[in-house]
Image (tube, coloured by chain):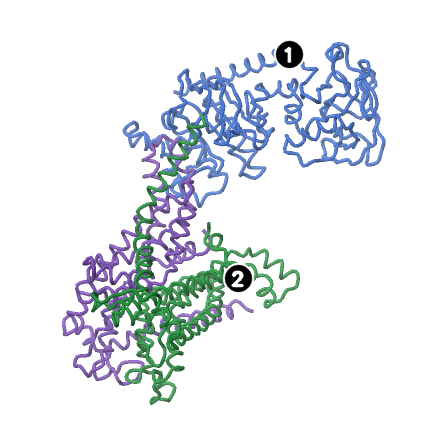
Chain colours: A purple, B green, C blue
Amino acid sequence: MSGRKHTVWWIVISLVVAVYALFPVVWIVSLSLKSPGDIANKQFWPTAIDWSNYELIFTGAAKDLFLPALVNSIGICLIATVIAVVLATLTAYAVARLDFPGKKLILTMALAVSIFPVISLVTPLFRIWSAIGLYDTWAGLIIPYLSLTLPISIWTLAAFFRQIPWELEQAAQVDGATSFQAFRKVIVPLAAPGVFTTAIIAFFIAWNDFVYGISLTSTSAARPVPAALSFFTGASQFEEPAGAISAAAIVVTIPIIIIVLLFQRQIVSGLTSGAVKG
Amino acid sequence: MKAKVSNRQRGETRLGWMLSAPAVIILLAVTGYPILQAVYFSFFNYRMTDPDNRFVNWGQNYIVILTDPLWWQTVGVTLLLTVVTVAVELVLGFALALVMLNALKAVRPWVRTAILIPYGIITVVAAFSWKYAFDLGTGFVGTWLSMPAFDWFGDFWSSFIVICAAEIWKTTPFISLLLLSGLAQIPSDMLEAATVDGATWWQRMWKVIIPNMKAAIMVALLFRTLDAFRVFDSVFVMTAGAQNTATVSFLTYNQSIGQLQLGMGSALSVLLFLSVALICFIFIKFFKVDLAQARGE
Amino acid sequence: MSEIELRNIIKRYGDGYPAISDVSLRIAEGEFVILVGPSGSGKSTLLRMIVGLEDITEGDLRIDDERVNDSAPRERDLAMVFQNYALYPHLTVAENIAFPLMLAKGQYSKEEIDERVNRAATLLELRDHLDRKPANLSGGQRQRVAMGRAIVRDAKAFLFDEPLSNLDAKLRIQMRTEISRMQRNLGVTTVYVTHDQTEAMTLGDKVAVLKKGVLQQYASPQELYDEPVNLFVAGFIGSPPMNFLPVENVDGRLRSPFGEFSLPAAEAEKLRGAPQYLVAGIRPEDFHDAATLDVAKRGGGARLSAEVDVTEWLGNEVYAYIPFEAEPAVRKALEELDRDLDGEGARTQVVAVLDPSTSVREGDTMELWFDPAKVMVFDPETGENLTRDPENAQRLAAESEAARQRALERAKSQQAATV
């Protein structure tokens, strides 16, 4: 095969992959830009670009549904991510660096939790939360989100930490560093990328949640965007809410796309190192 | 002097557990405790709206569920969905992994980015996109296929196909990344040796590549199977269980959160949990998936 | 520049396994000392105990007459070059070299740090690479950065842990010379761990040979070569290694598989009361082809007749290999020695390094000539060198110490001249 033919071939394959990956996204962008009259035209593209769906969710009738949900989603997911990453960092450090009986047990437990069916937890949590007043609160979502984000964070970070050349800590001590300096100046800079990547993955998982969101909330006090989407109605009761839902869906997808564009390499290394070999 | 050594070991053990304690406690609190609660309440006749009237009915819930054809039908649908999506994802994911592995340096980051978008996108958003693409009111698919009057969500098989498509689209990238890391670990000189030995592309694939990435394949398979068996979001958004498309997760949700039947819902939760545990057990026992090894232990 | 003293150092691990058994060493100011031994000899453990990365179970470690057993590594003020270089991947070459100086807060001004880094970089020819990250450097360059980090501050001593083992053969020889030159110029006390006897012999003022955590001999390279205390040291030092022939002691004459020979009277005297079966050690380079030897010289030596199995022609010399069968009693001792030396269970054979003018070829029967005075005789049970000459050993030690003092004086006067 000649070099040029090869290149053309690859461009074609890449295009196919790109179409595969982007098609549903482009479709929903297109849908969100349709005017109310266009929504039901059953065509892929809008006849004219129209921003009324975005006006609807940011300033119009749907704003009381969407804006609080957006704030809830951002707040709850960020807090759940930070807590998960901080706790997972401590645990992963212990697992990767220290030798103590029970560390296998901790990893196994994290694995067991990660394969736990979320729906199985929702029923009892629903009852407990109602009993102790955590139902429909931020804390009432943050805590169960930890069951989603902690296990994968522990595994991913443990895999990252195993790759850190820990003898550098000793080298730093010989170079005259105190234990704390060795940690601050050598280990932290080496561990930071792994922690950051783990945070991205944990955030994605929390951001993606639907089961907890829809089961453990009832008002805009804590309801996150994915759950709120199914409560959207059209401008009038008989109109399709598709336009507003699409616009809201795009708003919550934009951060994902930005993060993917900026950090695709790190995300791939994080996903694979946590899952298959370290 | 021996005491000194064991002191150090004891100190390390204490530090290890101190560092791990917060995470361990939270994990136990958010999973262990609720599941025990679920087991407990699964033996009650218990409606959330009528808490004073709850009483122990000694496994009656389980009998009701296991003798109800609806339960078995739901299990059947869930299993079918699992098998179909995982099988397609595995083949498609392997193809994607090969594309990423062999892609030219210049296009590789772009392919990777494109592939990560379905992974990162919210499942519910993806489900809405696929739903509206096929929906009778908004969908362009009917127009493109010149069958504008066909109601995709009007019967079981067409609904099932759309749900599968949405699931496959969303999760294939994850599988392909797992497989890619397995592929990347096969030393290239092994493939070169096979080529020199006269193996064709197809033979290299089946005799060298696939046997050597068995661990990666099995892990991807196990995690995706467990994931697919728990499918909920797509069903909720696309059909809400209509046309017999309810899955085990959806049925459980409907009982406990939808109808506030806590006793029955708890029993379903326990059965769902046991099903997942059973799948896990089957994989580890019969397919010999070594999770510890595969996960980099 | 400091003096390091190890007094009866013992290291035991949790399971009671002794990694180091009662090692005592005195490393004088400015001395270059090599710790050498096969794998598992405890040489790296000993080095890590000196620098403070391993606890000392028993015994005293003194630096400049101060006990430092319980000091943290940073308090000991020693610089170390690690086997894998231990460069900080997130720092540039310049930052790596400056790292120890940055840690000593307030001790060095910004200008002083720059100046010192530049001086070290110039010395190690790293000036062009100061802004690069370690990942982009070649093996030899990384090695030099690691050395730069060691020499940039005025540490009390340099410690090297197999620093050349990751380099290819050519670079290894080059870096070996550089390390030697640097140590001579700076005159800094240096402890260097290696498993390579060539490195040990070429670099060290003194060499400590270790086996399974026990110090075998601590002496100058020449003394190790000429007067080894036992079978292990004799077999470890020298390349190709010393030949060990099983011999039977018959009234002061030694009967080997290739024939009999007598030792000089003084040596034979030392074998009185020795066991019947012994091991004779003859270095390959002490064998000669009788046919190519001066007639005048031929008279004094001993001769053995043997059939040559394989010859290797190297240009400046010829290696001749001669297999033999050993007595069971001695064979066991030789096999054990082979294991101790990390051997591969090679066959029992004699290697002779001959002059290239020899006409001996594979399959020939040749006359091997050697000077019996150069033969060492060992007790196969204890491994002890029965023919060791302590007076000669003492003379060699004094000579090497005198040579070292001269070198040190030169370094000091040179330094005084440049300052």
Residue contact between numbered discs 1 and 2, judged by CB atoms under 8 Å: no
Spot occupied by residue B241 in the image (x, y as percentages of width and height): 33, 77
Q: From the viewer's perspective, is C64 left or right of A124? A: right
Q: Residues within 10 Å of mark 1 (few under 14, many from 20)?
A: few
Q: Is residue B106 visible?
A: no
What residue does disc 2 label? Answer: B286
Image quarter where the N terminus of chain A lies is: bottom right
Can the viewer see residue A13 in this picture?
A: yes
Is B83 situated above or below B12?
below
* Tag 1: amino acid: Pro
Residue C377, relative to residue C95: is it above or below?
above
Q: Which residue bears the numbered disc 1?
A: C390
Residue at position x 38%, y 20% from top? C419
Check the residue under mark 2 and report the chain it is in.
B
Horizontal side, residue C37 vs residue C415: left or right: right
Question: Which picture quadrant has residue C373?
Answer: top right
Mark in the foreground, 1 or 2: 2
For the residues beneath circles 1 and 2, the answer to whether they share a chain is no
